[in-house]
Image (cartoon, helix red, strand yellow):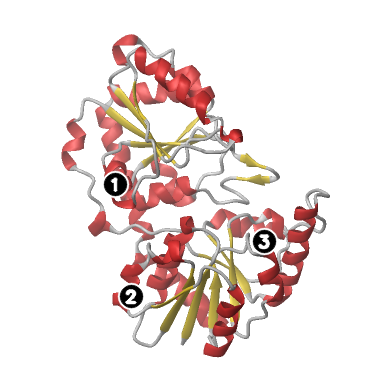
């Protein structure tokens, strides 16, 4: 079978390309990746596994013509949020599955608002509902949402990223750490985040505990005005002067370094607003937090309003507000037995998302699609 993966949107979705390629990798399949240069740099390891990578920076129509000339059996489009006119013209011959990061947009009868861009994308989705064979989503909650909303196309759950036990470098001696290491992954921004609210509450921590909890903002600074990065920076510098242990990074963090710092973490913390327009994180929209918990086998500290992932419940702690989140962090610092028990649960939960486990489910789904 000939399988194509198209990613011309963002390098942040490189992992999705790798995940799909690894799931379908077999002697019986030929896999082709059609990507931009910044994505290609992140997936070069796939070449040794026999994946053919085509790279284009411009003229996406060349890609589309190539896809149809190769006569693919199945095509995955991992990002359909960019290149409006190119996708409007593209009429693939293969069976196509489009990855949905936001499911609500695909279930609406009318556009969310009357902005020209919103109307244009609504129009494109209506066209692609007819062109595509089905959709892939990152979490079961999204699939359940689509079913409730009466979405007619078949949907397959393909996690954005997987757990690779052999790459888990979490150190066993972390269990004797005297510092609780907390990571907040992603761009440092107030866009869909509530970092300032959390930092304000964090300032009330007892003085004797301020250097016992490390907060690592594991991401590059937001560069747009709406990110409010300068306000976040000012607050962090203020807290540092008061004895708080807060780590901030000046630039984009290379993947190897990102993973090293994630491996050292005890808890992944999400000070976020779960509403994204009319989408809801954890229900109609997936979030990188869940996939970071999976790939790194870490405990998650998440807002109680966020719908939980069933497979991650035993390693997820929910907080009511940021005062409550602070209380939880202090309790984990003082209760090593509970912390270690949660770490054990996190690893057990991540083992549900190994390549072997996910591959079996996905391939069984596609047996019915590709006949």
In this view, 258 is above or below 134: above
Q: Which residue bears the numbered disc 2?
A: 47
The answer to whether mark 2 and mark 1 are in CB contact below 8 A is no
Mark 2–mark 3 contact, CB under 8 Å?
no
User: Whole-Å distance between the Cαs marked 3 and 1?
Assistant: 40 Å
Q: CA distance from mark 2 to mark 1?
A: 23 Å
Which residue is depicted at the point 48% across and 50% down? Answer: 310
Quadrant assignment, res 150: bottom right
Which sits earlier in the primary sequence, circle 2 or circle 3?
Answer: 2
Q: Residue at x 42, y 15 (%)?
A: 238
Answer few, some or many: residues within 10 Å of disc 1's Cα (few below 14, many 20 plus, some between 14 and 19).
few
Q: Is residue 181 left or right of residue 115?
A: left
Secondary-structure class at tag 2: helix
Q: Which circle, 3 or 1, is nearer the viewer?
A: 1
Badge 3: residue crowd in 10 Å (few <14, some 14–19, many ≥20): some
x and y, in percent, of residue 323 in the image = 49, 19
For label 3, the residue is 147
Which comes sooner in the sequence, label 2 or label 1?
A: 2
Of residues 126 and 257, the one nearer the viewer is 257
Q: Which residue is mark 1?
A: 257
Residue occupying image coordinates x 34% and y 18%? 244
Q: Quadrant of residue 337?
A: top left
Disc 3 element: helix
Left or right: residue 210 compared with residue 113: left
Question: Residue 65's spot in the image, x, y percent?
Answer: 59, 84
Of 229 and 96, the residue lying toward us: 229
Q: What separation in Å lies between label 2 and label 3 (alpha carbons)?
A: 37 Å
| In this view, the mark in front (2 or 3) | 2
Which residue in the rendered view is the most extreme toward the front? 58
- Looking at the image, residue 272 sits to the left or right of residue 30; the answer is right
Label 2: few (<14), some or many (≥20) within 10 Å? few
């Amino acid at each position: 079978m000939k399988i194509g993966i198209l990613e011309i949107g963002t390098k942040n979705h490189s992992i999705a390309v790798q995940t799909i390629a690894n799931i379908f990798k077999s002697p019986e399949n030929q896999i082709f990746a059609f990507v931009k240069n910044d994505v290609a740099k992140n997936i070069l390891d796939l070449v040794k596994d026999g994946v053919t990578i085509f790279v284009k920076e411009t003229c996406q129509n060349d890609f589309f013509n190539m896809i149809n000339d190769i006569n693919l059996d199945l095509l995955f489009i991992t990002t359909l949020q960019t290149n409006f006119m190119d996708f409007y013209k593209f009429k693939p011959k293969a069976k196509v599955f489009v990855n949905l990061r936001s499911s609500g947009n695909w279930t609406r009868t009318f556009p969310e608002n009357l902005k020209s861009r919103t109307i244009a994308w609504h129009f494109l989705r209506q066209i692609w509902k007819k062109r595509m064979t089905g959709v892939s989503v990152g979490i079961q909650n999204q699939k359940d949402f689509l079913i409730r909303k009466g979405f007619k196309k078949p949907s397959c759950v393909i996690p954005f990223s997987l757990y690779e036990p052999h790459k888990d470098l979490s150190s066993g001696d972390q269990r004797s750490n005297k510092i609780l290491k907390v990571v907040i992954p992603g761009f440092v921004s107030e866009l869909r985040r509530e970092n300032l609210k959390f930092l304000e509450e964090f300032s009330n921590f007892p003085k004797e505990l301020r250097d016992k909890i490390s907060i690592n903002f594991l991401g590059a600074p937001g560069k747009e005005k709406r990110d409010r990065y300068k306000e976040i920076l000012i607050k962090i510098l203020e807290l540092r002067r008061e004895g708080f242990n807060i780590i901030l990074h000046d630039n984009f963090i290379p993947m190897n370094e990102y993973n090293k710092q994630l491996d050292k973490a005890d808890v992944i913390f999400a000070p976020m607003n779960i509403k994204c327009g009319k989408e809801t994180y954890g229900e109609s929209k997936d979030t990188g937090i869940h996939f970071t918990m999976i790939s790194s086998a870490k405990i998650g500290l998440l807002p109680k309003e966020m719908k939980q992932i069933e497979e991650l419940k035993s390693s997820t702690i929910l907080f009511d507000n940021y005062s409550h989140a602070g209380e939880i962090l202090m309790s984990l610092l003082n209760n090593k037995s509970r912390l270690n028990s949660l770490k054990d649960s996190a690893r057990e939960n991540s083992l549900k998302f190994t390549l072997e486990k996910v591959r079996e489910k996905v391939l069984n789904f596609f047996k019915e699609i590709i006949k």
